[in-house]
Image (cartoon, rainbow, N blue to C red):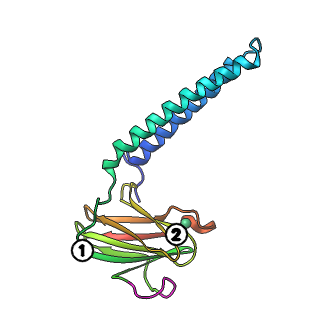
Amino acid sequence: MNLIVPLITVQNFAGIVSLIGAIVVLSVVLFLISSASSYEDKHEVKEKVYKARKRYFIGLASVAVILFFSSLQFLPYPKNQTTPADKIVTVVAMQWTWKMGEGVSTLSPHDFVGTNEITLPANKSIQFVVSSMDVNHNFAIYNSKGDLVAQTQAMPEYENQLYYTFPEPGEYAILCLEYCGMPHGFMTGKIHIN
Ligand SMILES: [Cu+2]
């Protein structure tokens, strides 16, 4: 998987936003430390801190609300899946691999037999029926550039439906995004799109 991308990726963007957030938090802390001069009495300092905290909270909440609503349009999921998908894939997560197979499984997650590599068509809507046979996992699909393109929780005794249309042929990697034990990082799979 090629993780070095010249253009800014979603992950890079999230990293930059986190960095800016950390700088803001650090600035507030430094401001509070510097403003807590020994010449002022405790009451005055407290007033200052409360004022700064209120402003910080309102600012942060406003940014969060704006980002939330303005980024909704980028969600990769269809608003209402009314037409049936072109293909259904059963996905069962287990410590520490994936079982995948085409079609709806009538077997229990435990008895379901699948492979951690699957070949699917491009430009066809795929419905992943995702569950787990042991603990909570997270089924995450990454494209060849290392961008997260779709994900859903893989939970025991519950089926999550994930709809995704692969826009182009290529290799897609599956990773688990829910820490599920020591070998969690090795819990990988592959989707070949052609
Ligand atoms: Cu995991």
Residue sitting at x 43%, y 83%: 114
Q: Can the viewer see residue 4?
A: yes
Three-letter amino acid code of the residue under disc 1: Asp
Residue tagged 2: 187
Question: Was residue 80 drawn as part of the magenta stretch in this picture?
Answer: no
Residue 135: give its label: none
- Look at the picture and state if 167 lies above or below 100: above
Residue sitting at x 33%, y 82%: 103
Local crowd size for mark 1, using a 10 Å CA cut-off: few (<14), some (14–19), many (≥20): few
Question: Was residue 110 drawn as part of the magenta stretch in this picture?
Answer: yes
Residue 86: give its label: 1
- The answer to which quarter of the image holds residue 130 is bottom left
Magenta range: 105-111
Ligand 1 shows up in the quarter that is bottom right
Between residues 90 and 45, which one lies in front from this camera angle? 45
Distance from mark 2 CB to nearest ligand 1 atom below 8 Å: yes
- Residue 184 percent coordinates (x, y): 57, 66
